[in-house]
Image (cartoon, grey):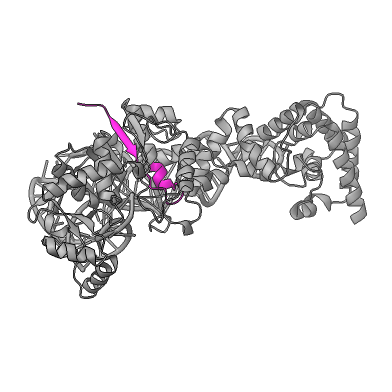
RNA sequence: GGCCCGUUGGUCAAGCGGUCUAAGACAUCGGCCUUUCACGCCGGUAACAAGGGUUCGAAUCCCUUACGGGUCACCA
């Protein structure tokens, strides 16, 4: 048994969406678990839709996720190049071989003619298959067609009878009768290979041992197997992963909100959360624990625990899981990840002094326990970075409209003014004392204080909040609130 | 439409002929904790698509139907 080699082979025609990310993840997990090699190959043979920008986007999304590849773009490898557009010689060689063997032939039909016939077939309820009319063109006919300016594509000749059985790790043996397959194009008239051909040529020349890809490719597989056989190459093991569907059970697309990895990143999700969640879509661990850091998933990952039913992704669970990692990850890391979100909202400067960094760290530590994404850290902490905030409507009604709150706040102000230590514990003691001295419940003072300091009715523990905010700012905000209330009255 | 795959609670998902009066997680609903919110903890609601077989016994095997998805491109 040779080495385990798997590959993720996206086409750079858009961003990496979560379905692709999940496929990449499973390939990566399998490679890491089996001590195999994970190859990244860019399938950029569609001239019209492929862009270098998409390729860069996919590469950086994979990097952000932390799915590192052993061979591929930016790092090379022994089986390169890793862009199909640079592998033309391989395809031409294989195509010539098929041509010589009589298993491929030139087809001069134009795309317009083809699609017209397809339409007609559909209309009359027939299967839209290529009729094989160019299969037996004579040399003279071909010359004439070429003189007409037609550039031929190359088609693979499907053996007329029999069937091809796909042996799939997830789905077992799946048979396809040859008469439902038609002669498909392997080299386009522009000289570039078509998917089913390029894919086989590359997988076999790159020594790919296991092909893990989405189930949508299952019905392409008999065609590919026929190519492997015609070329005399060894078959890889096929593993067709269940699809990931949008919440309405349809195929994932842009109109379903965030579906690209980049969008999840921008919404403040962490790679750990996304990866852990994605791993659970189609695969399940043996035990009951679902929160699993990547190394643990690698340790447990086996193909026999991959399911066969399509999954609908659920942002709620993803969010919950993200919240977990937001709290469990090392604080300094989370601070660094949160920084861009704070900066983007103009809450903190690009350049930070050590003391500002320390302040931000304390804020993040306080706030992260009650939010689930990095973006929410920014939402929940604005008042730490600006004195200019409004009092919540609900808070105004509940806490600032009671008679006597102004003096209560004033009393609190005078108490903490005398404090030498501004640690949470010291502040809390003085509040407890005050409430006892005045004979009012602690909540009577605490709630209005929170509103005075943050403008909100909910948030971190009040005494921690005050401590982080600092004595000076706390006093300022308290006295501002007293003034505000008196003005309203 | 042809071919292929699939169908366990709202969602993910365990289950691979008896231990299933069907696990766990998210969500949801109650309760506890608490200065608020969140966390955490405790508890509740909620599922084997339908019908036929096979078998002493089926969520698990077979068939049919229904539903969902995929695919039938000079896209991957």
Q: How many marks?
A: 0
**Residue plotted at (7% across, 55% down):** A161
Which image quarter holds the C terminus of chain A? bottom right
- Residue A93 at x, y percent in the picture: 22, 42
Q: Is residue A103 above or below residue A479?
A: below
Asked if one can make out residue A382 in the rendered structure from this viewpoint, the answer is yes
Residue A133 seen in this snapshot: no
In this view of the protein, which residue sits in the foreground, A12 or A461? Answer: A12
Q: Quadrant of residue A277?
A: top left
Please state the horizontal and vertical placement of residue A182, each as a whole percent of the image. 17, 59
Q: Residue A398, image x and y in percent?
A: 77, 52
x and y percent of residue A220 in the render? 24, 51
The quadrant in which the N terminus of chain A is found is top left
Q: Nearer the viewer, residue A438 or A126?
A: A126
Front residue of A353/A414: it is A353
Is residue A207 within the magenta segment?
A: no
Tell me the magenta residue range.
Answer: A1-22
The structure residue drawn at horizontal position 70% and vertical position 41%, both measured from the top left corner, is A381
In the image, residue A14 lies in the stretch drawn in magenta:
yes
């Amino acid at each position: 048994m040779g080495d385990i080699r798997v590959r993720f082979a996206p086409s750079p025609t858009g961003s990496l969406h979560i379905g692709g990310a999940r496929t990449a993840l499973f390939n990566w997990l399998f490679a890491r678990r089996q001590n195999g090699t994970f190859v990244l190959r860019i399938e950029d043979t569609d001239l019209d839709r492929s862009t270098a920008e998409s390729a860069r986007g996919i590469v950086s999304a994979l990097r952000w996720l932390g799915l590192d590849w052993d061979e591929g773009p930016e790092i090379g490898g022994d089986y390169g190049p890793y862009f199909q557009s640079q592998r033309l010689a391989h395809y031409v060689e294989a195509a010539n071989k098929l041509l010589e063997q009589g298993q491929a032939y030139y087809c001069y039909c134009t795309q317009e003619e083809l699609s017209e016939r397809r339409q007609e077939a559909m209309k009359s309820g027939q299967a839209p298959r290529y009729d094989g009319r160019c299969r037996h063109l004579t040399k003279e006919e071909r010359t004439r067609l070429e003189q007409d300016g037609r550039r031929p594509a190359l088609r693979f000749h499907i053996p007329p009878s029999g069937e091809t059985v796909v042996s799939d790790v997830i789905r077992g043996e799946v048979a396809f009768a040859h008469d439902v397959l038609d002669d498909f194009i392997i080299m386009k008239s522009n000289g570039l290979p078509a998917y089913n051909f390029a894919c086989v040529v590359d997988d076999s020349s790159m020594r790919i041992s296991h092909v893990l890809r989405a189930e949508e490719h299952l019905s392409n597989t008999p065609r590919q197997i026929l190519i492997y056989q015609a070329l005399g190459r060894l078959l890889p093991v096929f593993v067709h992963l269940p699809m990931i569907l949008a919440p309405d059970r349809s195929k994932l697309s842009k109109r379903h909100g965030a579906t690209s990895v980049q969008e999840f990143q921008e919404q403040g999700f962490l790679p750990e959360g996304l990866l852990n969640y994605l791993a659970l879509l189609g695969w399940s661990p043996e035990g009951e624990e679902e929160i699993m850091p990547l190394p643990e998933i690698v340790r447990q990952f086996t193909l026999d625990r991959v399911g066969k039913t399509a999954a609908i992704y659920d942002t709620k669970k993803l969010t919950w899981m993200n919240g977990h990692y937001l709290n469990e990850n090392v604080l300094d890391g989370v601070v660094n990840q949160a920084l861009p979100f704070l900066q983007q909202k103009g809450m903190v400067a690009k350049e930070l002094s050590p003391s500002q960094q320390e302040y931000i760290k304390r804020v993040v530590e306080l706030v992260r326990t009650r939010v689930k994404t990095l973006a929410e850290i920014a939402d929940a902490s604005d008042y730490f970075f600006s004195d200019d905030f409004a009092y919540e409507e609900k808070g105004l009604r509940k806490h600032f409209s009671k008679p006597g709150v102004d003096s209560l706040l004033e009393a609190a102000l005078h108490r903490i003014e005398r404090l030498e230590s501004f640690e949470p514990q010291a502040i809390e003691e003085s509040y407890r004392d005050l409430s006892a001295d005045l004979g009012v419940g602690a909540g009577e003072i605490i709630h209005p204080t929170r509103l005075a300091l943050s403008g909100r009715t909910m948030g971190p523990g009040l005494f921690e909040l005050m401590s982080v905010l600092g004595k000076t700012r706390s006093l300022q905000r308290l006295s501002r609130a007293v003034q505000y209330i008196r003005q309203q009255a």
